[in-house]
Amino acid sequence: MANDQLEQASAPDLAYTFTTIDPPDSSSVTVTGINNQGEVVGYYGAAGVSYGFVYDKGSYLTIDAPDASFTMANAINDQGFVAGVYMDPDSIIHGYIYKARALTIIDFPGIIETHPTSINSR
Amino acid sequence: LRAGRLLLNRPKRAYAHPFIYEHGSFVTIDLPGGVLAAPDSISINNRGQVAGSFENSSSQSHGFVYEHGVITTIDVPGANSTYVVDLNNQGDIAGFYLDDTGKHGFVYDGETFTSIDVPWGVSGSTAVADINNHGQIVGSFGSYNDSTSYGFVYDDGTFTAIAVPDALYGFADVINDRGEIAGVYYDADGGHAYVASPVPQDQTTIFPFLKAAPDDLLL
């Protein structure tokens, strides 16, 4: 493809500034969501353990469910509620909702795994 | 409202069900095919519509939208499989489909399917990941020159590449209503996440894709 074709295909008035997100001590990172306040969520690996995170304008918040072998943040809504999953010491996967350092477990009764994947802003 | 999936019996994907959770109560969704496809791509919008994908007995994937107890199947015409990855508050559905030529993105507004193929990408390599409430779509495509992947944003027929400076390759995973894009990229030090904020071009000193190394992504 020729350069002029590329420029025709690209928006002429749109450009971006890039900010790297490296959670502390992370060896790998995955992004799962961004809300309309610009808060970014995902999960990262550090020393063999996975943690959820919220990145907000240069600050990192780690989500680490109690006694969990891994924690993942899957989505964030415009009110800052985070939905995700964690695995307990018995290898049971639980869903959770997290806001303001408070974690609420979301478990369908009698089910071995509950995976919240999305949260709306209503 | 929260949406997700339940796994009733871990070894058997056939028992996974989408669910909606609100105020302590669950509603489960029984899919016609029974088997979730792309189970981490179940989305819910502010209208309470839930979208995702399921497989039939032939392992072909179909998209679906659930609203008020009714499931509508989403199949891109001519596709072998259709995967829905997200829907916005207008009910516009974004995803990708597979046909005999590879992978292609699409958006469906309830009446019309529009294919999304990055014009400078490898044919059949466009994967859509997210849509915002303005209809802007992000995803990733394969590069001819270096056989790697880069992100893109699609806005009403116009494509813009999302290439983090000095990255070996990367992906655009999510976009909000301000047009901010987040994803991951890889460089010599490994993997990183990023957020890309749109600015008017005259305020930008570098647009790496168009100005710094355009030949990297060209035929």
Image (tube, rainbow, N blue to C red):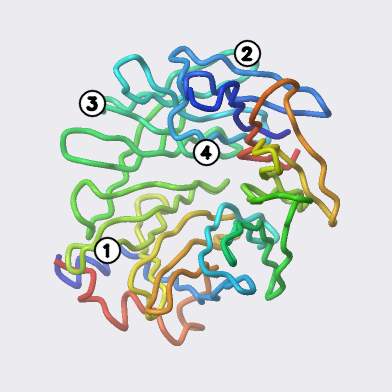
Residue named by callout 4: B40
Which dot marks residue B5? Answer: none
Which dot marks residue B78? Answer: 3
Residue at image x 61%, y 38%? Answer: B89
In the figure, is residue A104 to the left or right of B192? right
SS at circle 1:
loop
Which dot marks residue B148? Answer: 1
Mark 4 → mark 3, Cα distance in angstroms: 25 Å
Tell me where residue A52 sits by quadrant.
bottom right
Tell me where residue B195 appears, x and y as whole percent. 55, 68
Looking at numbered disc 2 in the image, what kind of residue is underneath it?
Answer: Gly
Q: Is residue B156 above or below residue A57?
A: above
**What chain letter is assigned to the residue under label 3?**
B
Which badge, 4 or 3, is on the more N-terminal residue? Answer: 4
Find the residue positioned furthest to the bottom: B205
Looking at numbered disc 4 in the image, what kind of residue is underneath it?
Answer: Asp
**What chain letter is assigned to the residue under label 1?**
B
**What chain letter is assigned to the residue under label 2?**
B
Q: Are marks 2 and 3 in contact (CB under 8 Å)?
A: no
Which badge, 1 or 4, is on the more N-terminal residue? Answer: 4
Mark 4 vs mark 3: same chain? yes
Mark 2 nearby-residue class (10 Å; few <14, some 14–19, many ≥20): few
In the figure, is residue B107 to the left or right of B3? left
Tell me where residue B39 appears, x and y as whole percent. 50, 33
Q: Quadrant of the C terminus of chain B?
A: bottom left
Mark 3 → mark 1, Cα distance in angstroms: 28 Å
Tell me where residue B119 sits by quadrant.
bottom left
Mark 1 → mark 4, Cα distance in angstroms: 24 Å
